[in-house]
Image (spheres, grey):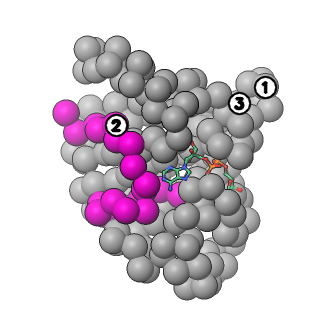
Amino acid sequence: MPLELIRHDITKLKVDVIVNAANTALKMGGGVCGAIFRAAGANELQKACDKIDGCKVGEAVITEGFHLDTKYIIHTPGPVWQGGGNQEAEQLMSSYNNSLNLAKEYQCKSIAFPLISTGVYGFPKEAALQIAITAISSFLIKHDMLVYLVVFDNTSFGISQKLFSSIHQYI
Ligand code: AR6
C-alpha cells in the first residue's frame, strides 16, 4: 500500500517533495514551517517564496528544496480552525488534493505531508487525520505515488495509531 504513516521529523525524509503547512503570505513561521525553513536554508527559501505572490488557503505552490534532501517543497496554507462552520474541512481537503496534484504535475514519485492545520491553526487532530487519509486514499486510487503521512507530536501519534489501523482494514 503506497500510504505510510510514520512518526518522524519531516525535514529528515528523503522523498521527492515535502509539504509545508504554510501561511498565506508564504513567510517563515513556527512549527513545521519553521523547521522546514531552517533545514532548507531560511534566506534562500524565503527569497523563493517572496517571488510568489502569496497563496490562498487550500491552494498550493512549489519551490525547490534547497538544502533539504528533497527536490521540492510544496507550500499549502491550511485553514485556521474557527469551530468547523467555515468550510474548514473542505479547505483542508483542498490543501491535500492541490498538493498531491501539484506533486504529480512535477513528476514526483514520493511525497511527505505533515498534519496540516493541526498545530498553530488549531484544527482538531482526529478529524484532520481522517481528512488527510481520505484525500490521500482517493488520490491513490487513480495515481501511483508513495505518500508518507508524518506525525510528530505525542497526541497525533496516539490518534493516528488508533485511526490508521481501522482505516487499514478497508484499503
Ligand atoms: N515534522 C513533522 N511534523 C511537525 C514538525 C516536524 N519537524 N514540527 C511540527 N510538526 P503547525 P499549522 C507538526 O503549527 O497548524 C506556522 O507558523 C505539529 O505537531 O506547524 O498548519 C506557519 O507559518 C502539528 O501536528 O502548522 C503558519 O503560520 C503539525 O505539524 C501556521 O504555523 C502542524 O502544525 C500553520 O499552522
> Label 1 sits on what residue type?
Gly
Q: Residues within 10 Å of mark 1 (few under 14, many from 20)?
A: few
Report how far apart the C-alphas of labels 3 and 2 lie in the structure. Answer: 26 Å
Residue for badge 1: 83
Where residue 166 appears, x then y in whole percent? 34, 14
Q: Secondary structure at mark 2?
A: strand
Q: Secondary structure at mark 3?
A: loop
Residue at (71% x, 46% y) in the render: 120
For residue 87, the mark is 3
Residue 38 makes an appearance in the image: yes
User: Mark 3 or mark 1, which is nearer to you?
Assistant: 1
Q: Is residue 11 magenta?
A: yes
Task: Please tell me in which quadrant of the rendered image residue 107 appears.
Answer: bottom left
Q: Give the residues drawn in magenta, as a range.
A: 1-20
Does mark 3 have its CB less than 8 Å from ligand 1? no
Residue at (48% x, 61% y) in the render: 74
Where residue 46 appears, x then y in whole percent? 62, 79
Residue for badge 2: 5
- The quadrant of the rendering that contains the C terminus is top left
> Label 2 sits on what residue type?
Leu
Q: Is residue 64 magenta?
A: no
Task: Give above or below for 49 relative to 90.
Answer: below
Where residue 34 appears, x then y in whole percent? 61, 64
Residue 138 makes an appearance in the image: no
